[in-house]
Image (cartoon, helix red, strand yellow):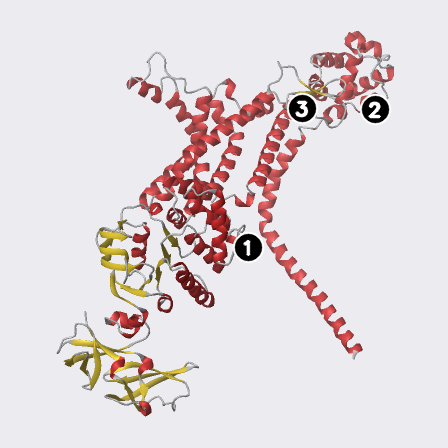
C-alpha cells in the first residue's frame, strides 16, 4: 500500500437508533486502487458507499479522503463521481446536457464544457449519441453515459453502486472489462459495490467482504479465494465444502483435524486456531480428486449420493469424513464415471484445505 | 420447373390474402365487442352532454325565427333594391305574414328586430295589432300606424334580419357589430361590455392559476416528502374541500373576510389595523382571488403531488454528487421533472376558473363578475338565448385554443393528472 487515499476509522451507522447497519468499520484504500465491497444484501456495503458519497452521515467515527475529514462535507462539495444502479441519467436532458451538467455546476467556460463533453463521449465510444435522450437508449448505452458523466469532471474517486445489475450477462461481462480498462487508463480510485462475486474477483485490486455490518476480510481476489479468513468468506466466495472437526495437532502452518467420524485430515491452519478447539475445514470442490489420481495423506472412502452432468464437468455429491454433503467437481471425461450408491476413493492435497477458527 | 415455381407463388399469394381477410375479421369482431361495452356511456354522454351543448351553441348563430314567421316577406324582400321606399307588394306580404302569425311569433320577431334597431319592437307590435283588421292598400295602412314604415332603413333592418344564420351575437359578444354597409366595426364605448368581461375572466383565471401554483407547489412537495401519518393527514386536508359543498366553502369565506369578520377582528385585536378602517377583503377582487384560489387548490396540488411522488430520489442524489448545490438541484432537476404536474394542474385550474360563477357572484363586487355570470344573466333574466350561446361559444373556443397552445408547447401526452 503506497499512499493512504481513503480511510474509514471506527465508522458506525445506525438508521433507527436501535441497531447498527455498519458497526465498527476500519478501512484503508490506497491511491489508484480498485476496491470492491462485496456482500449479501443488508450487509452494510451500500451504506458504506453512501457514507463515502455523502448521502449518509456516519453515527460515529471519521472518514478521510486525501487527508481531509469529509464525513460532514455535503455531497456536492466532495468531488466524487457516483454511478448509480439505474444510471439516474436526467430524463429531461439530452446525453450532452447530462454530461455538461457537472461542468456547468463547476462554472467552467463554455468552450471547455463542449470540449470535455466530447472527450468523455469519445472515451466511452458514444460520440454519436450526444443529442439523444436517455429514454431512447438501451441499458448498456445508458450505463456508458452514466459512467462518462461520473468521469467527465475528472474526480479522483468514482463510486459505483451495482452499476451492472440491470444488464444481461453478456453485456455485463463486456462492461466489466470496459470499466476495468478505464480504471487502468485513468489511474483513478474506484470503490465498487456488488453482490456478484465473479464481478468482484475479475475487476478488483482488492475485495472487501461484508456480512452483518462488519468487514469480514479485505484482500486481493487471489488471497480471498485461496486463503479465506473465516467460514463466511470461504463459503461466500466461490463454492466450498465445509467439514466440521476438532483440532488435534498444530505445528507451524499445518494442522491435523479429527472429523466427526474419526478420520484424521491434514490441513493448512488458519489464523487463531487452537488445539482442542472446534474448527471448520474448507475445501474447494474442484480440488478433490478421484482415487486414481489421489496421493498424499488425505485419502478417504466416500459414498456417492448423486451425480449431475454439467457438460464441461461433472458434479458428485458424496458422504465423506462424517459430512454427507461434500461436493466434488471433476472435468468431464477425465475419469470413469462413478455410479450413485457405490463407494469410491477420493483424496486432496494438504495445501488445498484450510482449517478455520470459528468466530 | 418454371411452371411449378409460378404455381407455388400464386398459392402463397392467395393464402396471404385469405389470412389478411381472416385477421381483419377477427380484429373487427373484437372492435365491435369493445364498442358495445362502451356504448351505454357513449349514448349517455351524447344525449346529455354533446347534444345539448351542440344545440345551445347553434343558437348563437341561429336566426330562423324571423324568416320562419315572415316567409312571404322574406321572398318579397329579395326583389327590393334596398334604397327606395318599397312598393305595395312588400307591404302586402308583411301584412299577410303578420295576419298569419300567432301573437307569440310576432312578439319573438319584434324582440329579434329590436337587436338591430331599438324602438322597432313596440312599433311592430302596434302595427301588427292594427294591421290584423286592415285592408289593401297596405302601404298607406302601415304608414298610417307608424310613419317610420316609409323609411328605407326600417326595411333594411328586415333585410338584415332575414338570413337564417347571423353573426350578430358572436360579434356582439366581442363588442363588434355590422354597420349598415355590412362592415364589422366596434360598438360604441357605452355598449362595449363583453370584451371587458372576457378580459376580466382571463385575468382572474390567470391570477388564480398563478396563486395556486405558488401555494400548491410547496404543499405538494411537502406531501411528497413526508411519510406515514403526516402524509395521510396532509392528503386528507387537501381533499377535505372536495367533501364540502362549494356554496358552504364560499359562504365560509364571507364569514371570514367581511368587514366585521374573523380576519378583520383578529387584526384589530392585534392592533395591526385601526378599528374604524377594517380592510376591504370581500366584495372586491381580493375576495374573489382568495376564495377561488382556495377552492381550486386541490386541482393544482393533486397532479403535482402525483408527479412528484413518481420522481425517484436517486435523481436528486445524482445531481448532488455531480456538484449541484441544493438550489441548483431543485431548479435544474426537480422542477423540470415535476413540470408535467404543474402544467396539468395549471391547465385544469385555469379552465375550471374560466367557468366560475357562484364564487365571484357571492364574494365579488359588480366589477368582478366573470363571463359565466353574463351567460346566466342572458339565459335566465333576459331570455336572450342567442347572446348566452354566443358568450358560451367564445368561452369554449378560448379553452380549445388554449388547449391547442398547450399541446403545441408541452404536448398533451405529457399531461399527468394521476
Have a look at marks 2 and 3 and say if they share a chain: yes
For residue B245, say whether it is visible: no
Q: Are marks 1 and 2 on the same chain?
A: no
- Tell me: A213 left or right of A178: left
Q: Which residue is mark 1?
A: A128
Q: Residue at x 43, y 46 (%)?
A: A103
Secondary structure at numbered mark 3 = helix
Q: Quadrant of residue A282?
A: bottom left
B46 over B204 or under it: above or below = below
Picture coordinates of residue A346, whole percent (x, y): 29, 88
Dot 2 surroundings within 10 Å: few (below 14), some, or many (20 or more)?
some
Report which residue position mark 2 lands on. Answer: B75
- Calculate the distance from the C-alpha at mark 2 to the C-alpha at mark 3: 27 Å
The residue pinned by badge 3 equals: B171
Q: Quadrant of residue B7?
A: bottom right
Could you give the CA–CA distance between mark 3 and mark 1, rounded to whole angstroms?
56 Å
Q: Evaluate if marks 1 and 2 touch, with contact meaning CB atoms under 8 Å apart.
A: no
Tell me if B130 is positioned left or right of B342 in this view. Answer: right
| Percent position of residue A95, x then y | 50, 51
Amino acid at each position: 500500500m503506497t499512499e493512504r487515499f481513503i480511510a474509514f476509522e471506527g465508522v458506525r451507522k445506525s438508521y433507527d437508533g436501535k441497531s447498527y447497519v455498519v458497526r465498527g468499520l476500519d478501512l484503508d484504500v490506497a491511491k489508484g486502487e480498485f476496491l470492491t465491497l462485496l456482500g449479501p444484501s443488508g450487509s452494510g456495503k451500500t451504506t458504506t458507499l453512501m457514507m463515502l458519497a455523502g448521502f449518509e452521515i456516519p453515527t460515529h467515527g471519521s472518514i478521510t479522503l486525501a487527508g481531509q475529514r469529509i464525513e460532514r462535507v455535503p455531497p456536492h462539495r466532495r468531488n466524487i463521481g457516483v454511478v448509480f444502479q439505474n444510471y439516474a441519467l436526467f430524463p429531461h436532458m439530452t446525453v450532452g446536457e447530462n454530461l455538461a451538467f457537472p461542468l456547468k455546476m463547476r462554472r467552467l467556460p463554455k468552450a471547455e464544457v463542449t470540449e470535455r463533453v466530447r472527450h468523455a463521449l469519445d472515451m466511452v465510444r458514444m460520440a454519436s449519441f450526444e443529442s439523444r435522450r436517455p429514454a431512447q437508449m438501451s441499458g448498456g448505452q445508458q450505463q456508458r453515459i452514466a459512467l462518462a458523466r461520473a468521469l467527465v469532471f475528472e474526480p479522483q474517486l468514482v463510486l459505483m453502486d451495482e452499476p451492472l445489475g440491470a444488464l444481461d450477462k453478456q453485456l455485463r461481462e463486456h462492461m466489466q472489462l470496459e470499466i476495468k480498462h478505464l480504471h487502468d487508463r485513468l489511474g483513478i480510485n474506484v470503490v465498487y459495490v456488488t453482490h456478484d462475486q465473479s464481478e468482484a474477483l475479475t475487476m478488483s485490486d482488492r475485495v472487501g467482504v461484508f456480512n452483518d455490518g462488519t468487514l469480514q476480510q479485505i484482500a486481493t481476489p487471489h488471497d480471498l479465494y485461496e486463503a479465506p479468513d473465516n467460514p463466511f468468506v470461504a463459503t461466500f466466495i466461490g463454492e466450498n465444502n465445509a467439514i466440521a472437526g476438532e483440532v488435534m495437532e498444530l505445528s507451524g502452518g499445518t494442522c491435523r483435524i479429527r472429523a466427526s467420524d474419526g478420520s484424521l485430515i491434514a490441513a493448512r491452519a488458519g489464523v487463531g486456531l487452537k488445539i482442542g478447539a472446534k474448527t471448520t475445514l474448507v475445501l474447494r470442490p474442484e480440488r478433490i480428486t478421484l482415487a486414481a489420481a489421489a496421493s498424499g495423506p488425505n485419502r478417504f472412502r466416500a459414498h456417492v449420493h448423486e451425480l449431475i452432468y454439467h457438460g464441461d464437468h461433472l458434479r458428485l455429491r458424496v458422504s465423506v469424513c462424517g459430512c454427507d454433503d461434500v461436493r466434488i467437481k471433476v472435468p468431464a471425461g477425465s475419469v470413469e464415471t462413478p455410479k450413485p450408491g457405490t463407494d469410491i476413493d477420493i483424496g486432496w492435497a494438504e495445501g488445498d484445505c484450510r482449517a478455520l477458527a470459528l468466530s | 420447373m418454371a411452371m411449378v415455381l409460378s404455381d407455388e407463388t400464386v398459392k402463397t399469394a392467395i393464402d396471404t390474402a385469405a389470412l389478411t381477410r381472416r385477421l381483419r375479421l377477427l380484429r373487427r369482431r373484437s372492435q365491435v365487442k369493445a364498442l358495445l361495452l362502451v356504448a351505454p356511456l357513449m349514448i349517455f354522454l351524447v344525449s346529455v352532454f354533446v347534444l345539448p351543448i351542440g344545440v345551445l351553441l347553434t343558437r348563437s348563430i341561429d336566426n330562423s325565427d324571423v324568416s320562419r314567421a315572415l316567409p312571404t316577406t322574406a321572398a318579397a324582400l329579395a326583389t327590393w333594391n334596398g334604397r327606395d321606399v318599397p312598393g305595395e307588394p312588400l307591404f302586402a306580404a308583411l301584412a299577410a305574414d303578420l295576419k298569419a302569425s300567432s301573437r307569440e311569433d310576432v312578439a319573438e320577431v319584434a324582440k329579434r328586430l329590436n337587436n338591430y334597431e331599438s324602438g322597432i319592437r313596440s312599433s311592430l307590435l302596434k302595427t301588427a295589432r292594427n294591421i290584423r283588421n286592415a285592408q289593401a292598400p297596405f302601404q298607406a295602412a302601415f304608414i298610417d300606424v307608424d310613419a317610420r314604415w316609409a323609411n328605407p332603413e326600417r326595411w333594411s333592418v328586415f333585410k338584415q334580419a332575414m338570413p337564417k344564420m347571423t353573426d350578430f351575437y358572436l360579434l356582439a359578444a366581442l363588442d363588434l357589430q355590422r354597420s349598415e354597409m355590412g362592415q364589422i366595426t366596434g360598438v360604441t364605448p357605452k355598449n362595449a361590455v363583453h370584451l371587458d368581461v372576457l378580459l376580466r375572466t382571463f385575468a382572474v383565471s390567470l391570477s388564480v392559476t398563478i396563486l395556486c401554483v405558488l401555494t400548491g407547489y410547496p404543499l405538494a412537495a411537502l406531501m411528497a416528502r413526508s411519510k406515514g401519518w403526516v402524509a395521510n393527514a396532509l392528503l386528507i386536508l387537501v381533499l377535505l374541500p372536495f367533501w364540502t359543498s362549494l356554496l358552504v366553502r364560499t359562504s365560509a369565506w364571507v364569514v371570514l373576510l367581511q368587514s366585521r369578520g374573523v380576519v378583520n377582528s383578529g387584526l384589530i385585536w392585534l392592533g395591526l389595523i385601526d378599528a374604524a378602517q377594517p380592510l376591504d377583503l370581500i366584495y372586491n377582487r381580493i375576495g374573489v382571488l382568495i376564495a377561488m384560489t382556495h377552492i381550486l387548490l386541490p386541482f393544482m396540488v393533486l397532479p403535482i403531488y402525483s408527479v412528484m411522488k413518481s420522481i425517484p430520489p436517486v435523481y436528486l442524489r445524482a445531481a448532488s454528487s455531480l456538484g449541484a448545490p441544493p438550489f441548483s438541484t431543485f431548479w435544474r432537476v426537480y422542477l423540470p421533472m415535476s413540470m408535467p404536474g404543474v402544467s396539468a394542474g395549471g391547465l385544469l385550474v385555469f379552465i375550471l376558473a374560466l367557468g366560475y360563477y357562484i364564487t365571484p357572484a357571492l364574494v365579488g363586487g359588480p366589477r368582478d363578475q366573470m363571463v359565466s355570470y353574463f351567460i346566466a344573466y342572458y339565459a335566465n333574466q333576459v331570455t336572450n338565448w342567442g347572446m348566452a350561446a354566443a358568450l358560451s361559444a367564445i368561452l369554449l373556443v378560448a379553452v380549445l385554443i388554449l388547449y391547442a397552445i398547450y399541446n403545441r408547447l408541452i404536448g398533451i401526452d405529457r399531461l399527468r393528472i394521476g
